[in-house]
Amino acid sequence: MQQVSGLRVLIAGGGTGGHVIPALAIARELRDAYGAEVRFVGTARGLETRLVPEAGFPLELIKVGQLKNVSLRTRARTMLDLPLGVMRCVGLLRDFKPQVVVGVGGYASGPAMMAALLLRVPTLAFEPNAVPGLANRLVGKYVSAAAVNLPETTRYFRNAKVTGTPVRPEFFAIAPKAAGGAKRLLVFGASQGARVFNEMMPKIIERLLTLVPGLQVVHQTGARHGATTLAAYNALDVSLAGVEVTMYLDDMAAQFAAADLILCRSGASSVAEVAAAGRAAVLVPFPQAADDHQRKNAEAFVAAGAAAMIVEAELTEERLLATLTGLLSDDARRAEMGSRARALAHPHAVAEIGQIVAGLAR
């Protein structure tokens, strides 16, 4: 890649892994391929406070809260903080003098992008979800360009390009799973786990193991409910030799490679990894996700024949058992679903986003 002399990029936003992890991938691409100096702007409540410094990038914090799905008091406090957040970002931009500001969604993205628009700094909005969050919707028609994950998202932005969501290369190297043999189910609910999985899987595991002989299950619980979930499994009068219950999973690419079927939420990072790995999945959207974006992510995969979806309000023990059993027992359907999922993947996403940023800087 051709380096851009003195390239400086500010990346704003974060909160959840769905925003922070792709943002870090973009930062590494800009640093390694273009020699860019990259700084982040976030808030004290997001994952960026841990992940960004660990990755070796400077992080500035601003104070800004939620506007969606909160009390009137919280919304009023956020409205008071917002102008201060914009002015704080104006100061950061004048000090750092970036050629481009990249907004990845989340609390800090809105003030930073507004500050960039005020100072006429080129802007790129990155949107991993089918429907943008509030921050990206507010600036979508005013940004210089946008990089989105799905074609239906382009209508929210000016100069939008479907690049996909950056995913680690290891996921794209995963081979299709061979038919036959013992099956393996991977259950996870992102870094925090998913309470609905933690409560329901122990209730159906005995019947699931009976209906799918030789089944192996890896269940990531998250730290908050790890002990109670493990206790629920251990209270069962059944052999759990093929069941692994853990609070954390370190090498997710290896877990995806070993899995025949995945049960997970439908956050942006999760569905992007499902697509890159080409694995069949049962998606259960988190119902409290802002603007119901997880459901819209899942619906896009269902429409493409790339996943099954169960809305949490309709998730009963019997339905979950029937869905998992049906897919684990049908090699052909899983293979077709995985193939359709991989068709939604974008192996060159981060390189394309880097090219857009460099083009805006030039």
Image (cartoon, grey):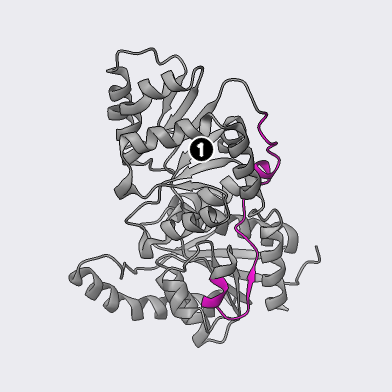
> Is residue 46 within the magenta segment?
no
- Would you identify the image quadrant in which residue 126 lies? bottom right
- Please provide percent x and percent y for residue 279: 59, 40
Q: Is residue 90 visible?
A: no
Residue 350, placed above or below residue 177: below
Residue nearest the observer in this picture, 17 or 95 = 17
Q: Is residue 210 visible?
A: yes
Residue under circle 1?
262
Q: Work out which residue is located at the far right of the displayed protein and give it.
A: 2
Residue 125, placed above or below residue 191: below
- Please provide percent x and percent y for residue 78: 28, 73
- Residue type pointed to by label 1: Ile
Task: Give me the residue at 36% from left, 41% from top.
Answer: 194
- Please provide percent x and percent y for residue 180: 63, 23
Task: Give me the residue at 47% from left, 28% from top.
Answer: 218
The C terminus is located in which quarter? bottom right
**The residue tagged with tag 1: helix, strand or loop?**
strand
Task: Give me the residue at 48% from left, 46% from top.
Answer: 308
- Would you identify the image quadrant in which residue 102 lies? bottom right
**Drawn side of residue 204 relative to residue 116, left or right:** left
The magenta-colored residue range is: 153-178
Residue nearest the observer in this picture, 224 or 213 = 213
Q: How many numbered marks, from 0 up? A: 1
- Please provide percent x and percent y for residue 210: 42, 18
- Would you identify the image quadrant in which residue 155 lies? bottom right
The N terminus is located in which quarter? bottom right
Decide: few, some or many residues near mark 1? Use Cα within 10 Å; few <14, some 14-19, many ≥20: many
